Image (cartoon, rainbow, N blue to C red):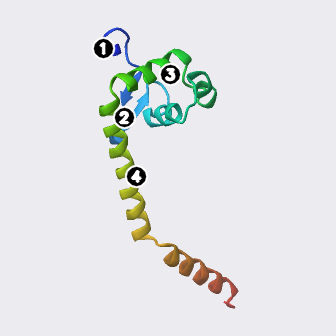
Amino acid sequence: MDISSHFPMPLAKHEGGIIRVRGTRVSLDSIVYAYNDGIPPEEIVSRFPSVNLADTYLVVGYYLCNKEAVDEYLTRREADAEDLQREVEAVQSPAARREQLMARLQDRRSPS
């Protein structure tokens, strides 16, 4: 049974393919991870006050009815996050950042 045929889904796809609860900045990821951590919908709402309880239940219901597709989406999002982290680290490694900061410090200490 697909609950979206009975209730409008409060989910919308945004830039970069991120799925968020409509009218909020709360991602599908956030709701699903909280739910999978054993947090009940009432507490999820207290953690994300921009999402109402009914929408939280609808999102959890959607997840439970479409677990395979949502899990694939979450896996892609995790892979994208790891790729981005690697890109950022490649551009500016901690060692390179330290060198830049030390050079700035040295410049400040040097008489002009």
Element on which disc 2 rests? loop
Number of the label disc, if any, that sits on residue 81? 4
Residue at mark 1 = 1
Q: Is 56 in front, or is 18?
A: 56
Q: Position of residue 58 (x, y in %)?
A: 44, 18
Q: Nearer the viewer, mark 1 or mark 4?
A: 1
Mark 3 lies on a secondary structure that is helix
Mark 3 or mark 4: whose residue is earlier in sequence: 3
Query: Exactly how many numbered labels are in the figure?
Result: 4
Q: Identity of the amino acid at label 1?
A: Met
Q: Check whether the beta carbons of the residues at disc 2 and disc 4 lie within 8 A of each other.
A: no
Front residue (pair 87, 59): 59
Q: Which residue is mark 2?
A: 14
**Residue 109, image quadrant:** bottom right
Q: CA distance from mark 3 to mark 4?
A: 24 Å
Say which residue appears at 61% left-offset and 26% top-offset.
Answer: 49
How many other residues sit within 10 Å of disc 1, few (<14), some (14-19) or many (≥20)?
A: few
Q: Identify the mark at residue 56; answer none if there is no mark.
A: 3
Q: Is residue 93 left or right of residue 2?
A: right
> What is the spatial separation of the Cα atoms under label 2 and label 4, in whole angstroms?
16 Å
Q: Residue at x 35, y 37 (%)?
A: 71
Separation of disc 2 and disc 3 at Cα? 18 Å
The residue most toward the top is 6
